[in-house]
């Protein structure tokens, strides 16, 4: 990275002089501003050691910041001398740090908040934290630390004081170190030791993984002595307004052998929306500078910077860059590449890296993949709030230039940082390459989209909106609702009825509060309402609740209809975004719309799936991996008995469901099998103890469930041995490693230890198959394409004449053995076919050909294709 001038200062006093606080103004009601100091906080009057001072010699200039004193600290007047302090001292000693000699220690609240009615230490309130803010500031300024270690989310927020990253949590930041420009020091983040002490009390749910604190501290302490990186400045951000100069820059980037990052600023989120346009673009192949092209912006006089003909010339040159072999890096390929495909009608060549995807590969925690978070972690720079991205045309040109250039420069900076991280972990690097390859195919699915039958949407919307009106009219006639409207002067609104329902049910009808909210008010969620309706003898209450629940159900469908309409293109297709940066298991997720979750368990609302249809003249074809998670458990554990049963097509879920339910196999129903699978088999495989499993079978003697699980583990003892190995490795390393090379970082529950890597690897087998299927279909000159991916299944827009060849080709690809760890564990698939995603029928493959089961009868493929719906 090149040298740059810094406008940041090392002393907070200087910063304060140049950035005086904005004077607080009184409201329209002339209320005085709130005061946050000891005068408005009563804690000092109630504790034994008020306004506790920081403690320690601080020889290595390390300041440790916790939440507040506990009762032991209050007794002795010294921070971190209780149980949490004992744990902290031990973990620091592993890295050669003496808590007393090398560190100072303090809290964000200096007085003990007291105990609750159960005798448990209370956490301070937000008001109390604000009242102690000045004391924390004083501790930092007086010690002038080289490293601040924040323990817990409140401490992290109090020290870093982020302006735009409002939802920072310790789960995102533990083990990480942020450069603080405000205090000119490093700020390390981890959990408070009390967090792990709490987990030790729940041994059936959590492993004893307090070593994670030690691992976090070891990484944090490694930053001692390292220089503080400075944020990017405006220097290097070049706004180019001459068309010839733009062309020269684009020619350079097209020929670049170095990695090039670029970024668009657009008028809309989706390129198929009306009025969609690219406003600006930035591009760079070095972190020290970037080129900004204000494509559609105007100058101060309101004149277009580039004429219409110049804009076309620039866009033609930009297309040449996208076609070039220059290695391309982006932040969120799902966004940039969709604009390339829809706006330019082409795909960028030599795309090598998505910093959003790789951020998730390195640290699979929600909320850590955005460029704002990445830039903040690298330099402490928050810049995302500097412009209103929805109204860029009204912003100052230099501001837009800086914003857009920083996007591309920080993307490139993040790329180099991520690349160096992966160089230390070859398994993770190989997984990142595979996962990045998968992003290209998921983009193909998004580009193709899913055809929507608008007439079905209209019909469903009309039906359920009509029912909503009738339900609302009936609810307003219920005496309790009428009384509420008369006394409150407010109209009953079932769309936002939480407070209204609480008043009607718990104050009006005097219903007992069996379920409560966090504020001790009566709950109005579905579980609470169903319980009340089942137990109450008041017919008015029953009528109200049943009507409201029905109203909510109809709304879930009409809201889904509205969502699909909002994101539909002019041709009647929706283009779901398949995201790879949200699920901690590396499963994909989908949004706009969420096509992976369409009322699959609700028999009534499943009818919405009728609106998802193939292209005219085509059929819907779906392939689903059979028993995938059980097979992946076999791959992980190498349990010989489990693998033998898989090889022999033994139905484990019916087998163990029958045993636990004390039934014969012949007597097992579909629902019984479902219970065996989801209430016994998988809970056992994922670490639930017998007494916990027994709670799912209240009608069965607990002793029988315990005995059955004991038999289960006798049969699959090598799975149990695998579980023990997973825990052993986790307690040593602080993470679990999956077969595909990715890692799930702790702290984790026992269930997560096993479930996450199984679920993730199961999806990645599908993704690997999807990559090959999407490549092979066009190679065979087939016009059938994959349109949808739902975790363990793929859906096709199928040409009828190609179905038999597609079924055989895809089955072969999906069931092939691709990795050594798959050896001996066969994969199996099941097929369905239909004219929409609702009316699907089993499709069977045999040596004699393909047939379809329709209403219990076998139908040939030709007859099915030619039959009327």
Image (spheres, helix red, strand yellow):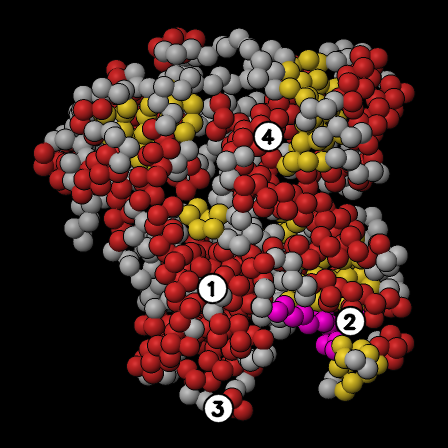
Marks 4,3: beta carbons within 8 A: no
Residue designated by label 3: 664
Q: Would residue 831 appear left or right of 123 to someone viewing this image?
A: right
On the question of residue 509 being in view, the answer is yes
**Distance CA(mark 3)–CA(mark 1):** 29 Å
Which image quadrant is residue 308 in? top right
The residue mark sitting in front, 3 or 1, is 1
Residue located at (83% from left, 60% from top): 784
User: Disc 2 or disc 1, which is closer to the eye?
Assistant: 1
Question: In terms of secondary structure, where does tag 2 sit?
Answer: strand
In magenta stretch: residue 94: no
Q: Is residue 39 visible?
A: no
| Residue labelled with disc 2 | 834
- Which residues make up the magenta segment? 825-844
Q: Which label's residue is closer to the chain start, 2 or 3?
A: 3
The residue that mark 1 highlights is 637
User: Is label 3 in a helix, a strand or a loop?
Assistant: loop
Disc 4 to disc 3, how far (Cα)?
58 Å
Crowding near the residue tagged with mark 4, few <14, some 14–19, many ≥20 C-alpha atoms within 10 Å: many
Q: Which mark is residue 415?
A: 4
Q: Position of residue 284 (x, y in %)?
A: 68, 21
């Amino acid at each position: 990275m090149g040298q740059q001038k810094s406008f940041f200062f090392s002393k907070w006093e200087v910063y304060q002089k140049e950035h005086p606080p904005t004077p607080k103004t009184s409201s329209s009601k002339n209320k005085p501003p709130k005061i946050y100091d000891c005068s408005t906080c009563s804690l000092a009057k109630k504790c034994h050691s008020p306004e506790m001072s920081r403690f320690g010699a601080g020889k290595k200039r390390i300041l440790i910041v916790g939440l507040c004193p506990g009762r032991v600290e209050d007794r002795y007047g010294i921070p971190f001398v209780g149980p949490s302090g004992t744990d902290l001292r031990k973990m620091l000693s592993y890295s050669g740090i003496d808590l007393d000699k090398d560190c100072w220690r303090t809290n964000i609240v200096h007085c003990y908040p007291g105990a609750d009615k159960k005798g448990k230490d209370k956490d301070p309130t937000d008001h109390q934290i604000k009242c102690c803010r000045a004391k924390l500031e004083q501790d930092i300024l007086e010690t002038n630390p080289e490293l601040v270690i924040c323990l817990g989310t409140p401490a992290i927020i109090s020290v870093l004081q982020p302006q735009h990253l409002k939802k920072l949590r310790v789960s995102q930041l533990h083990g990480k170190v942020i450069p603080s420009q405000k205090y000119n020091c490093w700020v390390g983040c981890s959990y408070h030791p009390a967090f792990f002490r709490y987990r030790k009390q729940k041994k059936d749910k959590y492993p004893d993984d307090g070593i994670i604190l030690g691992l976090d501290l070891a990484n944090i302490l490694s930053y001692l002595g390292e220089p503080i990186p400075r944020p990017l400045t405006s220097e290097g951000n070049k706004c180019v307004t001459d068309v010839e100069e733009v062309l020269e820059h684009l020619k350079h980037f097209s020929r670049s052998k170095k990695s090039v990052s670029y970024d668009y600023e657009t008028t809309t989120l989706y390129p198929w929306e009306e009025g969609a346009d690219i406003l600006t673009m930035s591009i760079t192949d070095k972190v020290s500078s970037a080129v900004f092209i204000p494509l559609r912006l105007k100058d101060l006089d309101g004149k277009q910077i580039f004429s219409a003909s110049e804009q076309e010339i620039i866009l033609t040159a930009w297309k040449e860059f996208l076609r070039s072999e220059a290695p391309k890096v982006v932040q969120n390929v799902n966004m940039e590449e969709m604009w390339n495909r829809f706006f330019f009608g082409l795909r960028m060549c030599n795309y090598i890296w998505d910093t959003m995807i790789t951020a998730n590969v390195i640290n699979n925690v929600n909320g850590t993949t955005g460029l704002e978070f990445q830039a903040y972690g690298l330099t402490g720079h928050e810049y995302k709030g500097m412009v209103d991205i929805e109204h860029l045309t009204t912003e100052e040109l230099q501001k837009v230039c800086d914003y857009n250039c920083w996007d591309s420069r920080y993307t490139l900076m993040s790329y180099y940082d991520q690349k160096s991280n992966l160089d230390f972990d070859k398994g993770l690097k190989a997984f990142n390459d595979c996962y990045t390859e998968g992003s290209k195919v998921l983009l193909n699915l998004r580009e193709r989209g899913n055809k929507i039958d608008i007439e079905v949407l209209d019909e469903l919307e009309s039906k359920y909106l009509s029912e909503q009106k009738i339900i609302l009219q009936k609810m307003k006639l219920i005496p309790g609702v009428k009384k509420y409207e008369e006394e409150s002067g407010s109209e009953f609104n079932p769309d936002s009825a939480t407070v209204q329902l609480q008043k009607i049910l718990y104050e009006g009808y005097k219903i007992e509060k069996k379920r409560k909210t966090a504020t001790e008010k009566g709950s109005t969620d579905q579980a609470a309402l169903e319980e009340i309706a089942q137990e109450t003898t008041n017919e008015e209450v029953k009528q109200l609740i049943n009507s409201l629940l029905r109203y909510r159900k109809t709304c879930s469908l009409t809201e889904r209809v509205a969502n699909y309409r909002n994101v539909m293109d002019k041709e009647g297709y929706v283009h779901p975004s398949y995201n790879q940066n949200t699920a901690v298991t590396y499963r994909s997720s989908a949004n706009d719309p969420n096509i992976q979750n369409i009322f699959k368990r609700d028999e009534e609302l499943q009818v919405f799936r009728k609106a998802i249809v193939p292209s005219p003249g085509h059929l819907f074809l779906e392939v689903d991996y059979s028993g995938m998670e059980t097979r992946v458990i076999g791959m992980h554990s190498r349990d010989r008995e489990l693998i033998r049963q898989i090889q022999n097509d033994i139905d484990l879920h019916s087998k163990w469901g029958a045993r636990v339910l004390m039934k014969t196999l012949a007597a097992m129903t579909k629902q019984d099998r479902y219970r065996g699978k989801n209430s016994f088999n998988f809970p056992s495989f994922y670490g639930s103890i017998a007494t916990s499993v027994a709670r799912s079978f209240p009608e069965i003697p607990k002793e029988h469930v315990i005995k059955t699980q004991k038999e289960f583990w006798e049969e699959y003892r090598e799975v149990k041995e695998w579980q023990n190995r997973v825990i052993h490795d986790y307690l040593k390393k602080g993470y679990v490693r999956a077969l595909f090379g990715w890692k799930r970082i702790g702290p984790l529950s026992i269930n997560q230890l096993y479930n996450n890597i199984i679920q993730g690897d199961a999806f990645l087998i599908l993704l690997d198959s999807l990559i090959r299927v999407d490549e092979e279909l066009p190679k065979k000159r087939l016009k059938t394409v994959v349109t949808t991916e739902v975790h363990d299944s793929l859906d096709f827009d199928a040409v009828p004449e190609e179905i038999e060849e597609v079924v055989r080709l895809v089955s072969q690809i999906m069931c092939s053995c691709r990795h050594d760890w798959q050896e001996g564990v066969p994969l199996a698939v099941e097929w369905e076919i239909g004219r929409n995603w609702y009316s699907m029928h089993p499709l069977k493959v045999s040596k004699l050909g393909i047939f379809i089961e329709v209403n219990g009868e076998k139908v040939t493929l030709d007859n099915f294709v030619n039959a009327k719906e």
